[in-house]
Amino acid sequence: MISKRVLYKALCISANVLLCNFFMFATSTRDYAEEPKAPEQIPAATEREPNPGERLVVSINGIEFAFRYCPGGDFTMGCPDEEDDDLIFIEPLIKVRLTHGFWMMETEITQEMWESVMGNNPSRFTGSKRLPVDSISWNDCQRFIAKLNEMNVAPEGLQFALPTEAQWERACRAGTTTPYSWGNSLNGDKANCSSRLAGYNAGPGKALGRTAEVGSYPANPWGLYDMHGNLWEWCSDKTAPRTYLYKIKELTDPTGYEGPTHTLVDNKWVESESDRHMLRGGGWNTDAIRRRSCFRSGNSVDCHSDEYGARLALVESKR
């Protein structure tokens, strides 16, 4: 049996140990509280590729310029055999690989956008700030883009440009393989076009006889409006002879034809002394069958037409 004396000593020792531990704890707690708290470390955002059709908005002079992401990848430019038609020649099939994604503007450049940067409005059709700017030449587009890039408003690592022809068709198709991004036919119900020649037996359709406000028709799968119709859209590439195109089977990150420019005469590309660049998508007065994703046209860089407009791309900066 433990004596009272031994029990008393044990209790005293335990009490001393508890008091010491309490003192040490209180002291360490006080000292820690008095030290400045280190700032919270916020982990860096994980870099990722945007999803197809993801939206990016750039504000320029108080106006929103909206873009949609178009991923890189493999696709086929041109017209497959099933699009053969006696009324129009077939565009050569070319396998294209884009190793980088890019951002395509959601709509054609509007009159409001153009006027806010250039201070003028060359358009024939007016009456709404949502109308696309028309009657602009390829050279006009280059001046517009140069001003935008001088503003340094593009997201870091990107710059404004006209899309290459391959980028344009990639964005227009938006992963589809049909003549139009929604299917096989067009007669004015899904795009602003002429009703003279409907696309693939669609039957006669409505025609506005002028431009429509951007976004008046359904967007394609990546959220891009008016890729078919409304206005022909300038691309950065020079026009190329069809004999040259038929020789090409595959291309990686094409930036356009570098040889002599060509003009279309009697459905044949012939060498031209003028500097000619590509136009894609068709205009408000263009037959529906010429609004297919694959269809190509071109004109001189200083040519103006009330069927000519453009849309911007955001691409990797070359600086």
Image: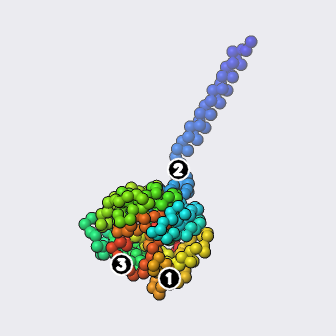
- Residue 189 visible here: yes
Please state the horizontal and vertical placement of residue 216, each as a whole percent of the image.
34, 58
Residue neighbourhood size for the residue with mark 3, other residues' Cα within 10 Å, grouped as few (<14), some (14–19), many (≥20): some
Question: Which residue in the protein does label 3 denote?
Answer: 304
Kind of residue at badge 2? Glu
Is 250 positioned to the left or the right of 6 in the image?
A: left
Q: Residue at x 55, y 63 (%)?
A: 81
| Depth check, front residue: 163 or 80 | 80
Q: Which callout, 1 or 2, points at the residue further toward the start of the chain?
A: 2
3D distance between C-alphas at marks 2 and 3: 58 Å
Kind of residue at badge 3? His
Residue neighbourhood size for the residue with mark 1, other residues' Cα within 10 Å, grouped as few (<14), some (14–19), many (≥20): some
Question: Which residue in the protein does label 2 denote?
Answer: 40
Which numbered dot is residue 190? none
Kind of residue at badge 1? Val
Q: Which callout, 2 or 3, points at the residue further toward the start of the chain?
A: 2
Please state the horizontal and vertical placement of residue 56, each as a whole percent of the image.
44, 59
Is 81 positioned to the left or the right of 291 in the image?
A: right
Picture layout, residue 57 above or below residue 23:
below
Which numbered dot is residue 270? 1
Picture layout, residue 146 above or below residue 25:
below
Question: Residue pushed farthest right?
Answer: 1
Q: How many marks?
A: 3
Q: Which callout, 1 or 3, points at the residue further toward the start of the chain?
A: 1
| Depth check, front residue: 157 or 293 | 293
| Depth check, front residue: 311 or 276 | 276
Q: Which residue is drawn at 39% across and 62% down?
A: 198
- Badge 2 marks a residue whose secondary structure is loop
- Residue 130 visible here: no
Q: Tell me the quadrant of the picture where the N terminus can be found.
A: top right
Q: Quadrant of residue 149?
A: bottom left
